[in-house]
Amino acid sequence: LVSPEDSDALLARARAAAAAAGGYSGDGYSEDDSEDSEDGYSGDGYFGGGYSGEGSEEGSEWGGVVSSGPPVDTVHYNVLLSTLAMARRWREALELLTRMRERSVPRDTVTYNAAISVMKSCGKWKLALKLLRKMRSEGIPPDTITFSAAIAACSREGEWRTALRLLDLARQAGVPPNTITYSAAVSACEKGGAWAQALRLLVGMREEGVAPDLITFNAAIGACARAGEWERAVSLLREGMAEAGITPDVVSFNAALTAHANALPPKPAEARALLDSMEASGAPPDRISYNALISALGRAGEWEAAVQVLRSMESGELQHGLAPPLRPDAITYTAAISAAADSAQAQAAIDLLGDLRSTGLPLSTLPFSRAIAAQAAAGDASAALGLLRELTEEGLKHNAVTLNIVLRAAAEGGQQEAALRQLLQILSAAEAAGAPPPADAETLALAKSMIDALAAPAAGQPGPGAQNSPGDRNSPAAQNSPSGLSAADVAALRPRLRRVQASVAAAEARAAAAAKRAEEDDRALASIGDPK
């Protein structure tokens, strides 16, 4: 409706116009459409009476207006709701819906379409469904735009089953899906890893006389790519798109290249041939294309060829047409590190990680994790511990998978005390930051096993938790420890392990609650088709 640059100005004007009809009561959106607190609500927030995030009315964005001015109708609110979708301000959208009810301003299909689009833009797919159910209960008929927006909201979260059920509901309601509707549903299947369903949708839409477009095909190829269905991906790219009169773009080719990398077994030769054909097809390869090729080579065990592609990018050899040479990014290096790690080339993985760090490119946890896995697979616990320490020093996030790899390697390599000392530092840092511990049940079991092993007398000497005063680093246990782990260290570690245990229990409770909410969502979705 308006450009994003004008959204703030329109927001200000529309707010003033909407507020002129009377002061805002601030009761929040309380029409039994609440969502879980994990999604941004609290008991006294939008759905419990009163907006809890903005303070008093005078201090809020809606306060300070007089109860006079021009009349405000549905169109004014619809304009503002449409603008909120671009501004990604879902809370204000809910407030506007409440205000319309309080001011007896009729809400129509356009109103709900705009509100659902706001939820789509903000990743609030459950709220989008609740709004759809609400409009049905008010006797407001949904149209193709309504269902397309709701399905797109589900698509962003990979909720493909819900998307398909919405598609069925649209047909039952006599609302014909169009290309946008189907494309959103295919995208949901792509993100949810449901490649077979994506292909069935592609066939079904043609049978219904709905023409797929470039977005539809790219999503379908992407769905095949995630599953490694490379032959189907290439078939869609070559035959399917040609039959539909659609020219593939670089996104189409990159999705097909990814399918070759994810195939079992990987197909590096076919991936290279496909990449070589891109320029002649009018879609010159980009950095993502070569990253996919490196992944295909690496997963096929051709790590040296993968590194050679990286080196060609570093030297500026890869140039297509008048475009500047393609240079590697952090993902390129990570793919090459993974290639070395998958081929048990521990030193090559470390060297490549060093190359990445020397470039000044943004670092992430993944390249460190892959290099750590390579050292652990080679039985070099000291190197794995060293990389874990460097990951900490870089200020990067730890995760349970990498931490467990290091702990297992340390246990097998006799580096229990060094591992426990680092574990203590990592858990202490997470606690100080108020963050959940980057650990899981396996971390807990490995740590407890190490502590028990160290606590047992060995060679006539007590373990770090057996005798001697806490913190006595001159004790025999501390002197014989490669890391200087003391009884005080063990005493400090135990409560943090209990915190891990509590975190694991909480995660299990959240999973159970999520399963229960999923059942409730299914029942709620079924009720959308019944306005009553």
Image (cartoon, grey):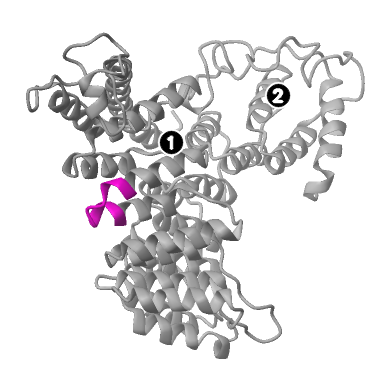
Residue highlighted by disc 1: 528
Which is nearer the N-term, disc 1 or disc 2?
2
Label 1 crowd (10 A; few <14 / some 14-19 / many >=20): many
Q: Position of residue 337 (x, y in %)?
A: 40, 62
Q: Quadrant of residue 64?
A: top right
Q: Position of residue 304 (x, y in %)?
A: 37, 76
Judge by depth and name the residue closer to the eye, 209 or 164.
Answer: 164
Q: Position of residue 83 (x, y in %)?
A: 75, 40
Amino acid type, residue under disc 1 in the picture:
Ile
Label 2 crowd (10 A; few <14 / some 14-19 / many >=20): some
Residue 348 shows up from this direction: yes
Residue found 37% across the figure and 66% down from its top:
348
Outermost residue toward the bottom in this view: 280
- Left or right of residue 469: residue 161: right
Judge by depth and name the residue closer to the eye, 27 or 391.
Answer: 391
Amino acid type, residue under disc 2 in the picture:
Met
3D distance between C-alphas at marks 1 and 2: 22 Å
- Left or right of residue 40: residue 344: left
Q: Quadrant of residue 460?
A: top left
Per the rendering, the mark at residue 100 is 2
Q: Position of residue 187 (x, y in %)?
A: 46, 57
Residue numbers of the magenta segment: 374-383
